[in-house]
Image (cartoon, rainbow, N blue to C red):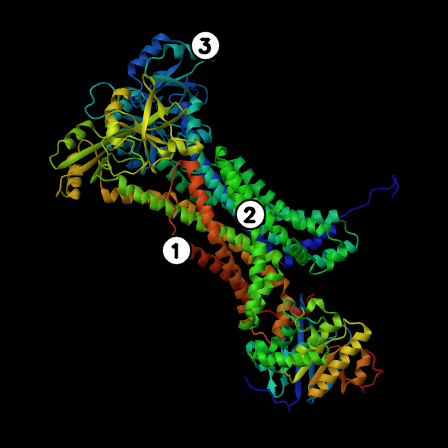
Amino acid sequence: MPDASPASAIELRGLSKRFQEGESERTVLQAVDLTIAPGQFVVLLGQSGSGKSTLLHLIGGIDTPSSGCVAIGGVDLTALDERDRTLFRRDHIGFIFQFFNLIPTLSVLENVTLPGELAGRPRAALETAAHDLLGRVGLADRASTRPDRLSGGQQQRVAIARALLHQPLLILADEPTGNLDEHTGEQVLQLLIDLTRQQGRTLIMATHNGAIAGRADRVLRVQEGHLLEASAPAAAVPA
Amino acid sequence: MSQGDAPPVVRNGPLWRLAARRWRRRPLQYLLCILGIALGVAMLVSIDLASGSAQRAFSLSTDAITGRTTHRLVAIGPGGVPDATFVALRRRFPEIPAAPVIEAYGRAEELDGELMRLVGVDLFSEAPFRGLLGGDGDGRGGGKGAGGRGFVPFLTELGTAVIAADTAERFGLHPGAADASSLLHLDLGGRTSPLRLVGSVSSGSALERRGLETLLLVDIATAQDLLAPAGAPAAPALGHIDLILEGPAQEQAIRTWLPAGLKLETAAARGNAVQQMTAAFELNLTAMSLLAMVVGIFLIYNTVTFSVVQRRSLFGVLRCLGVTRRQLFTLILGEAALFSLVGSLLGLVLGVVLGRTVVGLITQTINDFYFVVSVRQISLSGFTLAKGMVVGVASALVASALPAWEAMATPPQMTLQRSSLEAGWQRLLPWFLPAAFLSGGLGVLLLRWDSRGLVAAFAGLFALLMGAALLMPPVLAVVMAALGRAGGGFGVVARLAPRDILRSLSRTAVAVAALMVAVSVIVGLSIMIGSFRGTVVTWLDQTLQADLFVSPPSTTANRVLGKVDPAIVQAVAARPDLRAMVTYNSFDVHLADQDRDITLIAAGGDVSAGRRPYAWVRPGVDDPFAALAAREGVILSEAVYLRDGQGAIPEQVRLETPDGVRSFPVVAVFYDYSSDRGSVLMDRSQVAELWHDDNVASLGLFLAPGVEPEAVAAELREGFRSRQSLLVQTNGALRQGSLEIFDRTFAITGALQLLTVLVAFIGILSTLMSLQLERGREFAVLRAGGMTPLQLGRLTLLETGLMGLLAGTCSMPLGYVLAWVLVHVINVRSFGWTLQIALEPRFFVQSLLVAVGAALLAGLYPALRLGRMNISEALRQE
């Protein structure tokens, strides 16, 4: 499997995605072109069903485009087979979901070390790094707790730690605050932005929340299958 | 709501529409459930139909012969009713219709060797009874041919016969034709005689036609001629005399007149006796088929639970929107009823197909052990089909009641919570232990309740199995928790698998319990059959000591029905190359103590040469056979007193002889695995004296040292061919033949075992598929986080493998318990046989392999499906 270069950009070329719905075909994304510089924080805005999540899934390699290509760190994901795409994802991409999606049978610590363990990394080193990360997200004392004992905000913090542990090139966050109250959402968001900025990671976040756009380096809008550059990353950008 | 208000309108249409959409979305899950029910019902129905068909074939052909007979005069003992008795009876009671009958079984090449029931009748006496020949206006039959062209030769010529028109047509025979197409060569106990078909019989009723199919009607004189031993001095006897008695006065008159050595019995009594003979055998088969249904119930329970669990949020929303508890309950039970109905219907069809296959095996066993019957087709009994339907649907409703009640009783906000069901199970977990012990205790009590016969024993066995199944949730919880902790060092997959099983305990425990029960049935039956075979091999080795065994070729493998020509017996006895010769003969005798028939064996010497082991020998008796020869008493087989929980070894037995009931002291009890009805050994000379029968059915020859058995066997076969064709077997060949019968008897058990495992396999497959569907999103997260399809496959197979391993491991002790119960309780009560349990490692290894193999196989499809999952799509589902 080709290795990704941290210095290379994320590039989408002619990316399209169509879904079959009964007899008809629905185009969600149409010939999308995009280049994102390393270390940028990009916000994806758009109405529900506009294709934000689909775009994130395509960039993350958990879905395949109908046409076009996705290159991350110089590696064309669409040219990889299923196994290599998975391995690439495991090493270079971190996911954060709206519903946290922690594995209920694993403890907080085990959830955080999961991707690293799947990659066969030494457990001791993983646990040290995980404890460190959990400390930074304020959950140092909850390492052995099961996810169902945590609040929504705490669960999302665990998900952030899980996404960052293996120091991915790219973090994809799909409505990470969508399931949290305003105050908690704000805390989680700040934590996510701070950590990715500290590590110099690229963060692409799909959200309805226009207010987040003010903190982004770049704001994009998914509209009728097209990706539009929003005029300015300002707090006033409507969702 | 005031009394005047209209009752609230409740419409279930939308709920059923929702349910139907779900069936379309998850068809495989419901199909597997339907298949599980279908297999369970099919097994029940096939066994019932097959054994019912054998009974029915026997009773139809008996009915055809019985006609309007109310009573029959039979001989006490094997000699038959003297011809003179019939003449005397007609003179003394001219007003009572009476007809002589002789019955025997034989085979003819021209009929492809099919077993035929030869019936000798007296045409002049027949009219009031059967009307098979010539027609008597009652619509029962009506002879075709016999009454016209064939009538005269049937009466006047020896060696003529009438056959069913259908049978003649089937074999391309032409009764009445002048060429070979009307000729049969009938083999009766080794003597082949030509028979010319002079007419055919038929009936307007399909049932009666079936009854006639295996009959070969001859004149009584022809029957006597065919059955008379070569060179027999006097005219042979009649089989029995049929009577039509009107009222108790006539019955009393006959009883008063009855000459010695004869008895009067009702026509119905014989049919009952035949049914009783096979009752235990059939109950055993039915219980085996019910086991599959029990495993099927687990499957239904699991499917319905899944359908409830997976729709918990939907039910929560519906409850919030105003759907009543009753509506939910009705919906879930209604769904179960619908699927079980479809499954049961499919089961009936499968059962009929399977029944056609099984009927051969069952008929063979009945022929080997009980009575002679030839079954050409299975009888579709409405009662059996209805029973299959009821059992299928009722099982599904019982299995669904708990999850339906759970869905109904849960408040709406709880129904929405994902973990409410599992939390309920966790709370219930401590209660499984007392429930298991209660069920197990009940089982032990039922098994120890020894006067209650077989039904209680089987109920006890089922209670034990249920107890073991109830033990599974706590065992699974403890084992998986321990493995989850221990798996820490073996990577994340090793840690996830046991925890996933634990997290879905409500479903995994049921699947593992079902597999455990199914596999324990394999272990139990393997141990039982293995022990049985071992016991029989040892028994044969000890009992069969003669070098050669001579008998007429028999219609059944296990019993000798013909007799050896007395001249042959004499000639063989005079051979100089013999060290000794023993003779055997057997016939039914009435055991007055238990009011049932057993087998009386007239032994002229001990075929075991004193090596036979005895279950019991009367204190003071050194050699039971010497005591027999000295007429000090008789030797009983275990089955005489062990069957049906009869109890202790009797001091004496009372047997019916032609001169009245006589008591015989019991000197010993021997093992006899060739019959389950019980037998009594008596010295040949004593039998001849008391029952006036000195026939010989088989010979055991001990050859002088250095004489080659094969050479003597060939000489005997050839030397007497012109008088009687003989079956001469060496010691080894007879043992081999006996073991072949043994294996054939248990072939059906093997088939039932396989089907039970198939049902359990479907259960595991269905469970895994449902778990996979339920956890689709979780697996998608794992895949998004970098778990490769291979790793995910490994996780699935590890989960199923662990479930199979636990089921297989637990099935070993349970299988042993099952075997113990089968050997020491069920077998003793059913057949009166005591067996030595022999444990072989292969029984356990085999079952472990079956359990793990079945579980892994069941995990394969979900693993493959998961490998191809669309992660993006699965993540969107919630």
Work out whether B614 lies above or below B817: above
Q: State the image coordinates of residue B292 (x, y, percent, origin top left).
A: 51, 47
Quadrant where the C terminus of chain B sits is bottom right
Residue B262 in view in this figure: yes
Q: Amino acid at mark 2?
A: Gly
Q: Which residue is mark 2?
A: B467
Dot in front, 2 or 3: 2
Question: Which quarter shows the N terminus of chain B?
Answer: top right
Mark 3 lies on residue: B249
Number of numbered discs: 3
- Indicate the position of residue B496 as horizontal and vertical percent values: 58, 68
At label 1, the amino acid type is Arg
Q: Work out whether residue B677 can be spotted.
A: no
B93 or B495, which is in the foreground?
Answer: B495
User: For mark 1, what is the residue?
Assistant: B842
In three-dimensional space, the C-alpha distance between marks 2 and 3, rounded to whole angstroms, equals 58 Å
Occupied quadrant, residue B547: top left
Residue placed at 39% from the left, 36% from the top? Answer: B366
Badge 3: residue crowd in 10 Å (few <14, some 14–19, many ≥20): few
